[in-house]
Amino acid sequence: MNILHLSSSDISGGAPRAAYRIHRSLVDHGYSNGLHSQMRVINKLSDDPTVIGGQGAEWRRLLRGVARQACRRGFRSGNPTRHSIAWPATGLGRDLQQRHRKGHADLVNLHWLADSTLSIEEIGRLPMPLVWTLHDQWAFCGAEHYTSPPGPNESSSSDQRFVLGYKPSNRPHHEFGPDLNRFTYQRKRLHWRRPIQIVCPSKWLADCARRSALMARWPITVIPYPIDLATWSPLDQSQARALLQLPLDRPLVLFGAMGGTADPRKGADLLLNALQRLRSQLAGTPLEKLELVVFGQGRPTQPPDLGFPIHYSGRLHDDISLRLLYAAADVFIISSRQDNLPNTGLEAHACGTPVVAFRTGGLVDIVDDRITGVLAEPFDPVSLATAISWVLEDPRRRRQLGFAARARAEQRWNPERVASLYQSLYGDLLGMQHSNPR
């Protein structure tokens, strides 16, 4: 059984890293069962020989960029998420068909594609059995990768165009110019005649796909991301802090870069509000000496005043440094309004670090409330601040949360378990192909 994973990249960005981890789980645990996994990407950054890179002729790439720019001209949207029209063709579809004819790709597992990998039309022409692991909402939406994030008084997005179909009558008021989302959606409806087996890493994303007008009748299953439990494992907190030159005797709260404030989906504004409230909550208590650790950006010229000392760890390009940060922290915060199954939540759990997040999206699949962390009420900064305080105020409870977090990672995101689930799915699809040839 020869499986080819297709992604825009292998280790650049959250979705490609998740796709690469799925591929590696199959390389490490599928070969003995007759499964051979390779990965085809446009932008290869690893030195893994099982990953095939390359994007074709430069002139074709430049022409596609010019054509996309012309198609997008005049389009404006209040939804800040990325928009991909996946047009025109890249030529990679022919390469995949050749690999299939030569027996090198019995089944193709699509991942995060964007504009550079395959066009919508090329996806529709692929003849081999397909599995598509979704990493966001793009496949069943228009051009947008996520629907508009929830508003100030909403617990979930009110953007239901992906459910109703993209019609002129339901175009949101914050969009102007050509209806890029409707144009993209109509092409999907036209060219994707054959239902594709969909895999969603979270129950939330699977529910969205099942509700969508495009994929409501397609086969959809939930298989989480795997996490390497040897690479991501607990370390002694004091040693981790000493190595990172962080204070040994202060509560440390860890979160990702605040640089994404332009995207309300990440909830940076909610985290800032919660930290300001936390400062007043902790005044006069032993926890008032709390300090913050931020990864993903260096110290800005004018650091924000969050009420606590801040340590900036910069952009981390290796797993060991991030593992040390998780081990050094007392709690990790994810303040997203919308998210699928963020790698950082899995990594923190595998390292034995409790996670505090909002009770929304795929974050519910990560955090077992009051067992491995806390799920705050969406999208209430007071609830988020209270959740952080609850984790920190009892050291013994915090350690128990960490032990339970590691156990959850071992049980749910074990690469061998995830590889087995994918292998079973592939086997079923290929068995159906042989019994019902096209």
Image (cartoon, rainbow, N blue to C red):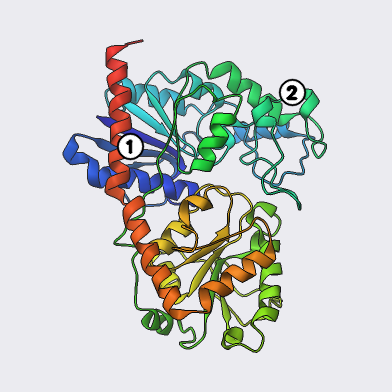
Residue at the image position 32 percent from the left and 62 percent from the top: 231
Residue at the image position 40 percent from the left and 47 percent from the top: 225
Q: Name the residue carrying label 1.
A: 422
**Badge 2: how crowded within 10 Å, few (<14), some, or many (20+)?**
few
- Image coordinates for residue 9, horizontal then vertical, percent: 46, 45
Foreground: 341 or 393?
393
Quadrant that contains the N terminus? top left
Mark drawn on residue 101: none
Q: Is residue 58 visible?
A: no
Asked if 391 appears above or below 344 in the picture, the reply is below
Q: Helix, strand or loop at disc 2?
A: loop
Asked if 260 appears above or below 312 in the picture, the reply is above
Q: Is residue 75 visible?
A: yes
Residue at the image position 36 percent from the left and 44 percent from the top: 22
Sequence-wise, the earlier of marks 2 and 1 is: 2
Quadrant that contains the C terminus? top left
- Image coordinates for residue 178, horizontal then vertical, percent: 78, 29
Q: Name the residue carrying label 2.
A: 167
Asked if 11 appears above or below 287 in the picture, the reply is above
**Badge 1: how crowded within 10 Å, few (<14), some, or many (20+)?**
some
- Image coordinates for residue 67, horizontal then vertical, percent: 66, 30
- Image coordinates for residue 82, horizontal then vertical, percent: 64, 43
Q: CA distance from mark 2 to mark 1?
A: 36 Å
Residue at the image position 61 percent from the left and 40 percent from the top: 145
In the shown orientation, is residue 190 left or right of residue 177?
left
Asked if 308 appears above or below 417 in the picture, the reply is below
Whether residues under marks 2 and 1 lie with C-beta atoms below 8 angstroms apart, the answer is no
The amino acid type, in three-letter code, at marker 1 is: Tyr
Foreground: 213 or 368?
368
Q: Residue furthest left?
A: 32
Q: Helix, strand or loop at disc 1?
A: helix
The amino acid type, in three-letter code, at marker 2 is: Lys
